[in-house]
Image (spheres, helix red, strand yellow):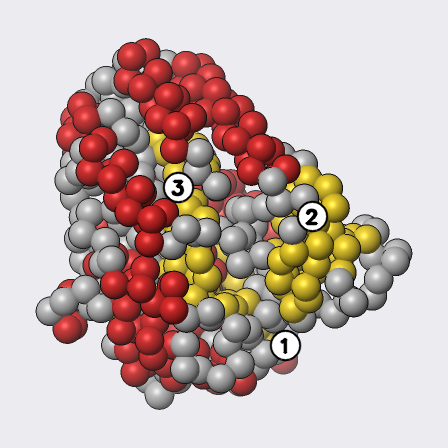
Amino acid sequence: MRTKSLKKNKINVVTLGCSKNVYDSEVLMGQLKANDKEVVHEEEGNVVVINTCGFINNAKEESVNTILEYLQKKEDGDVDKVFVTGCLSERYKPDLEKEIPDVDQYFGTTELPGLLKALGADYKHELIGERLTTTPKNYAYLKIAEGCDRPCSFCAIPIMRGKHKSTPIQDLVVEAEKLAANGVKELILIAQDLTYYGLDLYKKRNLAELLEALVKVDGIDWIRLHYAFPTGFPMDVLDIMNREPKVCNYLDIPLQHISDDLLKSMRRGTTKEKTTKLIEKFRAKVPNMTIRTTLIVGYPGETEAHFQELKQWVKDMRFERLGCFTYSHEENTHAYTLEDDVPDDVKQDRANQIMEIQSQISWELNQEKIGQEFKVVIDRKEGNYFVGRTEFDSPDVDNEVLINATETYLKTGDFYNVKVTEAADFDLYAEVIL
């Protein structure tokens, strides 16, 4: 007979979904470690915590399948306990408790102290900025705010994450200093909405002031901005981007669509004309800026004419980086009252068409880089290549720079100057300048 009391628990944290979830898992793991708990990320452990995503249908399916997979392991005796946290359980807790009752306990996005208690740990308030990072050692996510006040019709994030709440500048600086002390060289600033940062705390949009404080942190070489909202974007951020070499000439700004009809229905608070002018202003102020955006196709009421307008706009704007999603009909959102009238195969076909246009644009822009020199950071070694990124590329979603590992030895996490020798749709091939 197994005597569980003699065995030390090993807690395995499994993360699904976006970088905000990665960050939350890292905070949880930091708290557990401070409580002298043995904790691992996506390895073997007899106690499992699944940090779920509840954003769109595919993510919800993945979360449910992962829960069922670990419950099977529990039934087989390989796992003792399964806890579920994150956005899915925030959004659907009563349904989940009814439909999947074998989970030991469900926790929402704001119930970290309760989750820790269930794991036999105490929540330690003094641990500002202490977390166990799960990303490669050279970069880390810095979550500068939680929640969102925007009324976008298609989005369930405010349901799962609540109202916008900025983290004070001094706390973020402390966190950045601790990350730098652990060898982190690149901070990726994340939030549901960077544009809104500071309005609740400082009564003004304060992203520029936060950047001014973060560039002073020793050891940090790059600071990257993710998830800015187009309406009300604080233009003083661009001055700092121009002036401060540490702030990457890079901005992730999801625009979702360009047809005025759909922007209105999506409740985006902007128009085609305003959006186009904003992008033109960005490029005029920071000429070598890389703009990443994401679009949604198949939103309720999107006609062929709306889609053709979007396609033409993508061709005209020539975004350096672009992703495209199919619309997901989410209950309790404003758009859920509309008829989900674009068939799935049409949605997918439209997304494919947009990505085909983008891959051609990306190929053309990459051809222009042949012969140019760039500073790159090396993230990892894969097969016969060291894989790096320029300041114009974010991990996991953007272009990569491949350097032949049979000819040169490079150190992961270090910066090198390289010269581009070849270019594909989404990758550059380069050699190190010695």
Locate residue 212: give its quadrant.
bottom left
Q: Position of residue 208 (x, y in %)?
A: 28, 68
Check disc 3 and report the residue beneath it: 293
Check disc 1 and report the residue beneath it: 7
Report whether 423 appears left or right of 316: right
Q: Residues within 10 Å of mark 1 (few under 14, many from 20)?
A: few
Q: Specify which label sits upstream in the sequence, 3 or 2.
A: 3
Which three-letter amino acid code belongs to the residue tagged 1? Lys
Give the camera-side residue of 329 and 234. Answer: 234
Q: Position of residue 236 (x, y in %)?
A: 25, 63
Report whether 253 appears left or right of 402: left
The answer to whether residue 320 is above or below residue 404 is: above
Check disc 2 and report the residue beneath it: 371
Locate residue 196: give its quadrant.
bottom left
Query: Which is in the foreground here, disc 3 or disc 2?
Result: 2
* Residue beneath the point at 44% across and 34% down: 318
Which three-letter amino acid code belongs to the residue tagged 2? Gly
